[in-house]
């Protein structure tokens, strides 16, 4: 696995917006390149990078460990990596203005709260949104797109899809820039699309 390359972004839209605004959402399907694109943007920023890993450690899961190892080998050695799991909101509040944080990912953060009650889930979301607004650092938020396939056959799968999709829209409305990454290509949704009206 090659390391992240700190090179210029080719094909980025020249629309007067900064390439790295304060809050960016990078979403896409599994294997589409969203984490690599977020890593590229973080590297290109020239700022100290804090990598906030929200996934579980799962030391007994060999497949998961191989995935973690791939991500670790890609990251530059000078990045500050923090295994935050479900404590993302607290870590966001500890960031400094000169830093840029890469959160990978919102999906594994949702998974950490999947067994909580609807009330506790709502509280967790409110705390996260407040932390996103309060942190002085720039943020790159990686998020999985999971609603393009079949309907999950289990109740917990349906709950994960519903919670992640709802959180993605809440976060997306607060973002200065949103990227959709698939087939190894990054699309600027703010440049290409228009907002969908909210539910009445």
Image (cartoon, rainbow, N blue to C red):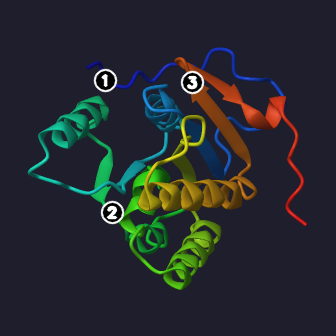
Q: Quadrant of the C terminus?
A: bottom right
- Disc number placed over residue 85 in the picture, else none: 2
- Could you say whether the residue bearing mark 2 is in a helix, strand or loop? loop
User: Do callouts 2 and 3 mark residues in contact (Cβ within 8 Å)?
Assistant: no
From mark 2 to mark 1, how far is it between C-alphas?
24 Å
Q: Nearer the viewer, mark 1 or mark 3?
A: 3
- Could you say whether the residue bearing mark 1 is in a helix, strand or loop? loop
- Disc number placed over residue 3 in the picture, else none: 1
- Relative side of 194 to 178, left or right: right
Q: Position of residue 131 (x, y in %)?
A: 56, 72
- Could you say whether the residue bearing mark 3 is in a helix, strand or loop? strand
- Residue 199 position by quadrant: bottom right
Neighbor class of circle 3 (other Cα within 10 Å; few <14, some 14-19, many 20+) is some
Q: Quadrant of the N terminus?
A: top left
Residue situated in front as seen by the camera: 83 or 153: 153
Vertical placement of residue 167 versus 191, above or below: below
Vertical placement of residue 51 versus 4, above or below: below
- Disc number placed over residue 182 in the picture, else none: 3
Q: Position of residue 37 (x, y in %)?
A: 51, 29
């Amino acid at each position: 696995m090659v390391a992240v390359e700190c090179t210029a972004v080719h094909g980025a839209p020249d629309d007067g917006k900064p390439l790295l605004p304060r809050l960016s959402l990078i979403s896409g399907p599994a294997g589409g390149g969203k984490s690599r694109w977020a890593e590229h943007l973080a590297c290109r920023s020239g700022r100290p990078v804090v990598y906030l890993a929200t996934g579980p450690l799962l030391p007994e899961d060999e497949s998961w460990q191989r995935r973690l190892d791939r991500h670790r080998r890609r990251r530059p050695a000078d990045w500050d990596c923090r295994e935050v799991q479900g404590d993302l909101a607290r870590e966001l509040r500890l960031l400094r203005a000169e830093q840029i944080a890469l959160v990978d990912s919102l999906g594994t953060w949702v998974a950490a709260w999947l067994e909580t009650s609807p009330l506790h889930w709502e509280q967790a979301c409110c705390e996260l949104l407040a932390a996103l607004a309060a942190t002085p650092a720039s943020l790159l938020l990686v998020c999985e797109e999971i609603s393009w396939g079949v309907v999950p056959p289990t109740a917990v799968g349906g709950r994960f899809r519903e919670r992640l999709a709802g959180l993605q829209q809440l976060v997306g409305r607060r973002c200065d820039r949103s990227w959709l990454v698939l087939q190894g290509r990054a699309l600027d949704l703010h440049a290409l699309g228009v907002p969908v009206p909210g539910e009445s």
